[in-house]
Image (cartoon, rainbow, N blue to C red):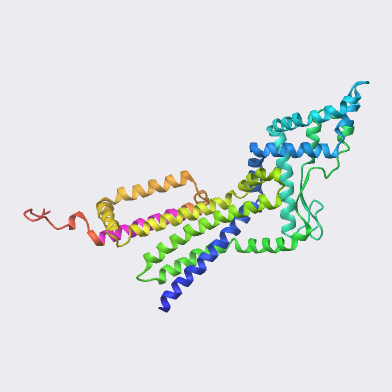
């Protein structure tokens, strides 16, 4: 009884660590990684829904920071000045349409990506308790400054340089983090930096120890781990959905909620991939353990594949190698895009095939060992 409690305690602890470790890996690989952030920024600015919402935001910011009617009045011929205010109002929607087209240009998208990259650099500096770009971890704020896009918009609309020079430096600034949030965020990031490198290793070790100790019940333990991985993958997907709903409904103004939801999905894509990977690995583990189980269907399947596994091993190893190569080409999980993950998955596939081959060999033997049917002579050498 105590032995059983130890096994399930190890599995329980490993499962909790796996869930926490998955969240830390997401933060480390997506929120704190410059390359991942830039890829997400590029995907965000290329999204049509984001372009539409950002167009309205930029035009509203331009009208809030510049008297567009006064700027147009200066450029109208004498006698037509009274038309400036109606023209400014009529120009608003065409300006939104113009910005949408403008945001499809690679050069303009580059302005957004550069602004986002600078904001991320400031964010990481602050979270890691560093200083940079005038940001102090004591009283600084991390912002996304879109003022260059507003200036670009004003230039496209034909506003004079004098009018554009009156745009405040903080126009179109979105606050990402305030100084009140720094202490908690810095503590969390320091923990993530330490934990993300070790948690998943601890999960693998604890699961391996639990399976090793579960003598006489290793298939059940492995099958249970598979179901747990599937459940944890689903939990990560649910967390992503619930947190996304909170960010969208609680923090974004109504007119920007759809865009905020889109941005959230893009910026949490790695979290979704982690959830899907856990579901995939758990499913493969469960199917493998069911195939090795004592049920009648499992035994029938093993009897069917036994001749290939035991008499034509080359075909079996060739098939598993082909599956391994297909998995590498697919690259659907992070592990399949790293050299260590590719080698680890290849080793696990080989171990699984060898374990199944030994099981079928013990159960059914080879064709040479099969008993002769009544009335037939056994061939001799």
As drawn, which residue projects farthest toward the bottom? 2
Residue 85 against residue 336 in the figure, above or below: above
Residue 54 is covered by the magenta coloring: no
Name the residue nearer the viewer: 352 or 317: 352
User: Which quarter of the figure has residue 135?
Assistant: bottom right
Q: Is residue 323 left or right of residue 358?
A: right
User: Which quarter of the figure has residue 95?
Assistant: top right
Residue located 83% across and 27% down the image: 87
Counting labels gives 0
Q: Is residue 293 left or right of residue 230?
A: left
What is the x, y in percent for residue 209? 45, 69
What is the x, y in percent for residue 377? 7, 54
Residue located 53% across and 51% down the image: 334
As drawn, which residue projects farthest toward the right? 78
Name the residue nearer the viewer: 185 or 242: 242
What is the x, y in percent for residue 126? 75, 57
Q: In this view, does 80 lie to the left or right of 115?
A: right
Give the quadrant of the N terminus.
bottom left
Residue 354 is covered by the magenta coloring: yes
Q: What's the magenta region?
A: 344-361
Q: Is residue 266 left or right of residue 370?
A: right
Name the residue nearer the viewer: 24 or 321: 24
């Amino acid at each position: 009884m105590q032995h059983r409690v130890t096994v399930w305690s190890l599995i329980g602890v490993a499962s909790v660590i796996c869930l926490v470790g998955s969240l830390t890996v997401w933060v480390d690989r997506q929120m704190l990684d410059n390359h991942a952030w830039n890829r997400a920024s590029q995907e965000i600015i290329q999204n049509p829904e984001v372009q539409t919402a950002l167009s309205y935001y930029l035009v509203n910011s331009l009208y809030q920071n510049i008297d567009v009617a006064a700027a147009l009045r200066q450029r109208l011929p004498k006698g037509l000045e009274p038309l400036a205010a109606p023209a400014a109002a009529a120009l608003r929607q065409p300006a939104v349409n113009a910005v949408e087209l403008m945001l499809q240009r690679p050069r303009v998208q580059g302005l957004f990506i550069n602004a986002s990259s600078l904001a991320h650099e400031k964010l990481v500096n602050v979270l890691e308790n560093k200083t940079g770009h005038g940001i102090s971890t004591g009283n600084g704020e991390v912002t996304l400054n879109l003022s260059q896009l507003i200036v670009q918009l004003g230039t496209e609309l034909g506003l004079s340089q004098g009018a554009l020079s009156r745009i405040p430096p903080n126009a179109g600034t979105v606050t990402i983090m305030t100084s009140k949030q720094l202490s908690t965020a810095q503590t969390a990031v320091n923990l993530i930096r330490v934990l993300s490198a070790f948690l998943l290793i601890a999960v693998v070790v604890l699961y391996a120890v639990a399976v090793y100790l579960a003598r006489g019940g290793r298939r059940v333990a492995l099958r249970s781990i598979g179901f747990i991985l599937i459940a944890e993958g689903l939990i990560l997907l649910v967390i992503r959905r619930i947190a996304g709903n909170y960010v969208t409904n609680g923090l974004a103004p109504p007119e920007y909620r759809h865009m905020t939801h889109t941005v959230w999905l893009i910026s949490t894509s790695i979290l979704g991939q982690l959830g899907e990977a856990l579901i995939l690995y758990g499913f493969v583990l469960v199917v493998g353990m069911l195939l090795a189980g004592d049920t009648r269907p499992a035994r029938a399947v093993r009897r069917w594949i036994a001749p290939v596994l035991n008499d034509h091993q080359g075909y079996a190893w060739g098939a598993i190698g082909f599956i391994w190569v297909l998995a590498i080409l697919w690259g659907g999980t992070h592990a399949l895009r790293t050299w260590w993950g590719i080698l680890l998955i290849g080793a696990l596939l080989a171990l699984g095939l060898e374990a199944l081959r030994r099981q079928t060999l013990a159960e059914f033997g080879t064709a040479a060992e099969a008993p002769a049917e009544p009335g037939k002579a056994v061939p001799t050498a």
